[in-house]
Image (tube, rainbow, N blue to C red):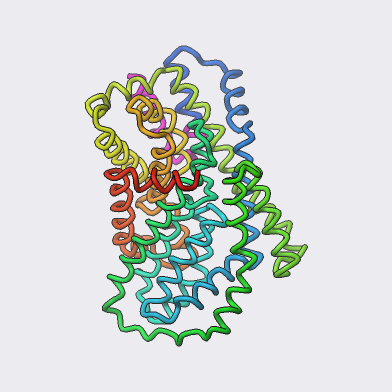
């Protein structure tokens, strides 16, 4: 009955069109009434305490860094470098999209920011070159999924806070899985583009490649600073976010000089608005997370999943299918915040490595960003690229299947995640 009240009130609020943050608060209040615990002061304390977290400071700073990179020219130079390296091969612009997406993921950690930048920069070029616009839009949307996987990742930060798992370990463990997803997209694009009659642009000369590399060097240094700093213990993930924002601001204003002082106000306001939405969502979800614990819902879920407890692989497969279903109807951040306190006791009871689980959980939630009908990244690509939502959905299907295939490959063979992670620890 407790589970029904929580899920039923949440779904009812969402069906009425109430924003997800307020829907979470409504479901929390309903659960409090059911448990005879309603107290406005407890509600307010949990709401404020939910956002009062030092590690969560990484979220607004990574968002600020992403905004600065897009406006300051760092993103464009990454795309130019990828164009110089692989733009001349058949279907080269698709490979450019994948390569640029992986590099941008190591800069911003936001699927929405990466998808918007890649759509604006590359979709017109792909259409002009003769590529199918629907397929090109689908590829760009699927590449945006890599953003929350390859560190620095806002999704991994939120999961690390909610699950009390080392964010640094999550960052380091997610590097190879993110690259594997990029590899799967590369193979899928090569298979789909083989029959297209596209004349690729001429190969860039060595001098042009070196120029593109020099122009992008300052942007390429940032992920190296972050990963080396985390690996060597120089700074925490939160401090890494501050380093990323300050570095991006310095490069954009002093080195590239594309970000002018009058533009700074707009950049700060845009990142503040996005951060406020995410932080309020986190705060509202923390109220529900506290009530989930008080109501002992994790124990009920453990009891439901007991038949799978003897086999970690079957348990992980069942959890991944559950998250896939939830991801079709809910955005990434609320899914992480709602399911993490419910699933973590199950994972620990089965003896599954929390870092391994966290990486696969975030990958699944990231792919959920391109699964209809919600699909936040699908909406971004459709809006920026002026494509209908139905067309983007059709275009993304083969790439989404490839991403899910890689994820379940990691479920069956956990060492694909754990062994590379041990190299970085």
Identify the residue at image location x=51%, y=29%: 25
Q: Quadrant of residue 77?
A: bottom right
From this viewpoint, which residue is outermost toward the top?
Answer: 36
State left or right for residue 149 relative to residue 231: left
From this viewpoint, which residue is outermost toward the right?
Answer: 261
Foreground residue, 264 or 238?
A: 238
Q: Position of residue 358 (x, y in %)?
A: 43, 39
- Compared with 155, 383 (above or below) is below
Foreground residue, 77 or 63?
A: 77
Does the stretch in magenta take in 81? no
State left or right for residue 299 relative to residue 33: left
Foreground residue, 274 or 241?
A: 241
Does the stretch in magenta take in 13? yes
Secondary structure mostly taken by the magenta-highlighted segment of the chain: helix
Identify the residue at image location x=54%, y=38%: 281
In what quadrant of the picture does the N terminus appear? Answer: top left
- Compared with 233, 128 (above or below) is below
From this viewpoint, which residue is outermost toward the front?
Answer: 423
State left or right for residue 111 relative to residue 394: right
- Compared with 27, 314 (above or below) is below
Q: Position of residue 238 (x, y in %)?
A: 63, 42
Q: How many marks?
A: 0
From this viewpoint, which residue is outermost toward the left?
Answer: 307
Let me know if residue 197 appears in the view.
yes
Q: Position of residue 423 (x, y in %)?
A: 46, 47
- Compared with 252, 371 (above or below) is above
Segment colored magenta: 1-24
Q: Position of residue 278 (x, y in %)?
A: 56, 42
Identify the residue at image location x=38%, y=73%: 133
Let me know if residue 15 appears in the view.
no
């Amino acid at each position: 009955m407790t589970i029904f009240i929580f899920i039923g009130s949440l779904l009812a609020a969402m069906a009425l069109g109430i924003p997800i943050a307020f829907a979470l608060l409504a479901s929390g209040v309903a659960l409090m009434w059911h448990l005879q615990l309603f107290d406005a002061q407890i509600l307010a304390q949990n709401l404020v305490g939910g956002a009062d977290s030092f590690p969560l400071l990484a979220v607004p700073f990574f968002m600020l860094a992403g905004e600065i990179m897009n406006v300051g020219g760092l993103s464009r130079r990454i795309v130019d470098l990828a164009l110089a390296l692989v733009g001349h091969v058949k279907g080269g612009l698709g490979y450019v999209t994948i390569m640029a997406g992986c590099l941008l993921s190591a800069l911003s950690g936001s699927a929405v920011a990466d998808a918007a930048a890649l759509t604006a920069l590359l979709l017109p070029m792909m259409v002009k070159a003769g590529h199918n616009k629907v397929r090109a839009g689908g590829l760009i949307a699927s590449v945006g999924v890599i953003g929350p996987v390859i560190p620095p990742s806002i999704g991994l930060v939120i999961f690390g806070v909610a699950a009390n798992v080392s964010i640094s370990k999550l960052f380091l463990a997610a590097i190879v899985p993110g690259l594997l997803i990029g590899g799967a997209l590369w193979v899928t694009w090569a298979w789909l583009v083989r029959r297209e009659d596209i004349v690729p642009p001429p190969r860039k000369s060595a001098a042009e490649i070196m120029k593109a590399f020099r122009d992008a060097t300052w942007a390429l240094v940032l992920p190296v600073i972050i990963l080396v700093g985390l690996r060597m213990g120089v700074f925490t993930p939160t401090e890494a976010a501050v380093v990323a924002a300050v570095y991006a601001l310095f490069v954009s204003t002093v080195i590239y000089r594309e970000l002018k002082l009058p533009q700074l106000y707009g950049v700060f306001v845009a990142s503040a608005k996005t951060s406020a939405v995410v932080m309020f969502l986190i705060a509202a979800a923390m109220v529900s997370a506290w009530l989930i614990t008080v109501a002992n819902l994790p124990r009920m879920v453990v009891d439901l999943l007991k038949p799978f407890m003897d086999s970690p692989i079957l348990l992980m497969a069942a959890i991944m299918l559950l998250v896939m279903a939830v991801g079709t109807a809910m955005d990434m951040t609320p899914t992480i915040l709602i399911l993490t306190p419910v699933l973590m006791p199950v994972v620990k009871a089965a003896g599954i490595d929390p870092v391994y689980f966290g990486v696969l959980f975030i990958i699944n939630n990231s792919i959920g960003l391109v699964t209809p009908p919600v699909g936040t990244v699908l909406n971004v690509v459709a809006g920026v690229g002026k494509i209908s939502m139905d067309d983007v959905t059709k275009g993304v299907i083969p790439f989404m299947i490839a991403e899910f295939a890689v994820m379940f490959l990691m479920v069956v063979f956990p060492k694909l995640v754990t062994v590379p992670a041990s190299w970085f620890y």
